[in-house]
Amino acid sequence: MLANQHTAALIAEMDKTSPAEHWLEKLHDGTHVLIRPLSTHDHLGLLHFFQRLSPLSLRFRFLGAVTHVDASAIDTLLSEPAQISRGYLALIHHDGELQVIGVSRYRRATDQDEQCDCAVAVADPWLRKGLGRLLLGHLIDAARREGFHKMCSTDLSTDYPIHGLYKQSGFTSAYLGRDFDRIVHELEL
């Protein structure tokens, strides 16, 4: 018998994906989350995820350029081919349904084939529980398997939580030239 309905629902969702590409992980608070690849079937879940993010989290994730995520933005995110982009999402079972609580993604750099740009976003109530570290870890592993040599992320200099995450994961950090509003984090893979 499974420990609880939450875990049972996540295991049922795992049966829908490739065994090599999903993980049932435990957060610092003991909550189990399912991490699996993004799929075109995730449109509504991703839309709800981004719409629930606080204005500050949206500002950090999109460098201040986006204040609202609509269906067309999710379409763009999910329509990129696997050779260019890969992403993972974290799911919990909440109020009888699966809910997206985090997402990580990399995209091949347009000017360098061996480099990818990455981003991680975690729902506000789930911050500081180890979810960002798990999502980024799986993303780094995927980038290495795909043959990338470097992973980069450009972030606002005031996004202290993401700076800590990247530092813990081995990234180096530097300001973007004379632009002290942004920091570039880089990891040699």
Image: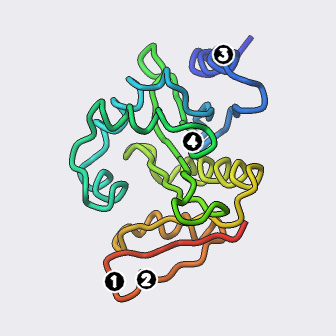
Report the disc number at residue 87.
4
| Position in image of residue 80 (x %, y %) | 50, 38
Q: Amino acid at mark 2?
A: Tyr
Would you say the residues marked 3 and 2 are in contact, meaning their CB atoms lie under 8 Å apart?
Answer: no
C-alpha distance separating marks 3 and 1: 45 Å
Secondary structure under tag 1 reads strand
Observer-nearest of 156 and 116:
116
Q: CA distance from mark 4 to mark 1?
A: 29 Å
Which amino acid is tagged 1?
Phe
Q: Mark 1 touching mark 2, by CB under 8 A? A: yes
> What label sits on residue 16 in the rendered view?
3
The one nearer the camera, 117 or 50, is: 117
> Would residue 26 appear left or right of 44 to someone viewing this image?
right
| Residue 167: mark in rendering | none
Residue 3 shown left or right of residue 88 in the figure: right
User: Regarding mark 4 in the picture, which secondary structure is present there?
Assistant: strand
Image height of 109 relative to 107, above or below: below
* Residue displayed at 53% across by 56% down: 118
Expressed as whole percent of the image width and height from the top left, the position of residue 124 reads 37, 46
Residue occupied by mark 2: 175
Mark 2 and mark 4 lie on one chain; the one further toward the N terminus is: 4
